[in-house]
Image (cartoon, grey):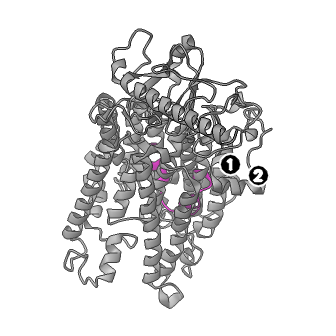
Amino acid sequence: MSDNPDSPVDSGHPVDAGRQPVDAELSVDRVFPTWSDPVATAASTAVGGPWGRHARVGRNRFWTPLRVILAMAIVVLAFAWIKQEPCAGGDWSGSKQYTHFCYSDAVPLFGIHGLDSGAVPYFDSAVEYPVLTGWFMYGAARLSAIYDSAALDNGLLPDMPAVYSYYAVTALLLSLCALAMAWAVQRLSGRRPWDAAMVALSPLLFVHAFTNWDLWAIAWSSAGLVAWSRRRPVLAGVLLGFGIAAKLYPLLFLGVLFILCLRVGRLREWGLATVAAGLSWAAINVPVALGAADNWSLFFRLNQTRTADPDSLWRILEHFTGSTGTSLFDPPLGADQAPTGLNIAVALGTAAVCAGVAFVGLRAPVRPRLPQLLFLLVAGFLLVNKVWSPQFSLWLLPLAVLARPEWRLLLAWQAAEAFLWGPRLLWYLGVDNSGLRIEWFFLAVGIRDVLVIALMLYVLRDLWDPRWDVVRRSGMDDPAGGVLDGAVDRFTQSEVAQPLTRRGRLRIDQCRWRIRGLSRPEVVQRSGHDEPDQPGDVDPAQGHSDRSGVERLGQEWDLDPDPDQVGHQSGRVPPAVASVRVVQRGDVDPLLGDQVVVDRVDRAPRREGHQDQQHEVPEVVQEVGRGQQGDQDRDQDEQTDARRTHP
């Protein structure tokens, strides 16, 4: 591991110092995946290998990480359109939508909802989608009508069927939404901007970008998270309200924000965001509800009467238990009758998921990061819900990348999602038309569900023991958290500090800390090593040896060795310190109490003289000193015995 706290590598993996870039000052705020992720490292061999020791960062003014990521997404979206183009004209003879794997809801609904004749959703035709999605459909239809008229008038533009131009416009607008999603993930990744490449290059994005209009809601909700991360709760609420008006699932975000804001005592910001979300949702929905109440409520009625989707666990249970009713919990029902038993089971399952996420959010030893809880809640909701349409998996894409930005399992899950599209469409094709039996489709669903559960378990492990969390190992707390980032627990108080081992490891949870060197700051810390630093260890990026340090979740954080300057560096100390380890330097004889002093800070760095909470820690620091002194005496005794044995 590099001794530089701002090293562009994941501190959880030792890295040869010789591979650090020469322009270290230009790369101190960036984590390179080819140095820390084995999948990215292996993939980089196709383009010359991992980032090298002479590579320069920040020299290219145009090809910034964001623009490279957006370019990646554009390429993937272009291939996604090539895949969908055979179905764009509406000629689905011979079950082309299944055999060419290019089915999309947008093509048939263009005529079903009267968009081809200028019908206004909800007022002129019943639309089974939330209002903002209906307006998206209408806006795309109007833009395509303008194109069709221009192509007919001047003859310069390509002439195409109305449904083709409508679907092309829809795909272009959804592509903008996908780019907004990639932009948001890059902005929410902090020092790990290249994590957004997992979104841009996603197989899931390739398969389902244009299957439905879900990217519209994802763009709004992702932008809302960016606003929240910038500590603008009102704007975040407005954007989340638009997302809820497009798809209901962003409503779950407000629940997660409530749990985390309750934990750190920032309910005012949550209240502002919630009120703003409610007002923006109402501004979109109330005019339609007043003018076309029956058509507006169709979305809610349909969700009540809808039976289990083929992709859901409920449908699999119904099949293999031999259920003869409408659902596993209901007798045969009419077309407009709601499966009450199934709805109750789904409600109970959803309540259990929400309760479990709330428990984790309030009881985890270290406050979970916002994307971690969001992923757990949305993934759990999809697993217990009676409907998991294939494009719903896009909801998880940005959340999964932010919650656990490691390529291997994410790629496995996304590959399973992409593969699932094939068995689903071949099952729709029917066995008589050389399709698949439903059991093969259920097998693909089961593989997808197992991988989602595996992702959830890994996220749970990371948030319960943040030493596994690559984001926090990179020297950050919660880059997407906004007011939660670096906040101190209020509702749940964990133990402040306790000695864990004789060698002087302290456990410090959920506080904001600073390290203040005393008269002899000759003590250094080296994360991941029990042996003392060797004399003369030098940080190759800084060119000098720092003598005071703090270990945060495996990340070393060096301070200035000058005691008079350390007090002014409080802001550099990580906001959520997981552990502090003081390791004796090989050529120094530390004295008791001559190590470092850890002072708790509530919200802002404390100045010299504000040490009212210092009494909580020095006793533990003294135990560190005694433990290290004992180790030193033992080592000296062993060296003396060795000299006597081998004069």
Q: Is residue 318 left or right of residue 524?
A: left
Percent of width and height locating residue 484: 40, 33
Q: Which mark is residue 329?
A: none
Q: Secondary structure at mark 1?
A: helix
Q: Nearer the viewer, residue 545 or 170?
A: 545
Looking at the rendered structure, the kind of residue marked 2 is Gly
Q: Is the C-beta separation of discs 1 and 2 under 8 Å?
A: yes
Which residue in the protein does label 1 denote? 34
Task: Tell whether position 267 is magenta.
Answer: no
Where the N terminus falls, by quadrant? top right
Asked whether residue 155 appears in the rendered view, the answer is no
Residue located at (19% from left, 68% from top): 340
Q: Is residue 319 left or right of residue 645?
A: left
Residue located at (59% from left, 19% from top): 560
Which residue in the protein does label 2 denote? 49
Q: Secondary structure at mark 2?
A: loop
Q: Nearer the viewer, residue 627 or 533?
A: 627
Percent of width and height locating residue 598: 43, 23
Q: Is residue 469 above or below residue 568?
A: below
Magenta residue span: 199-220
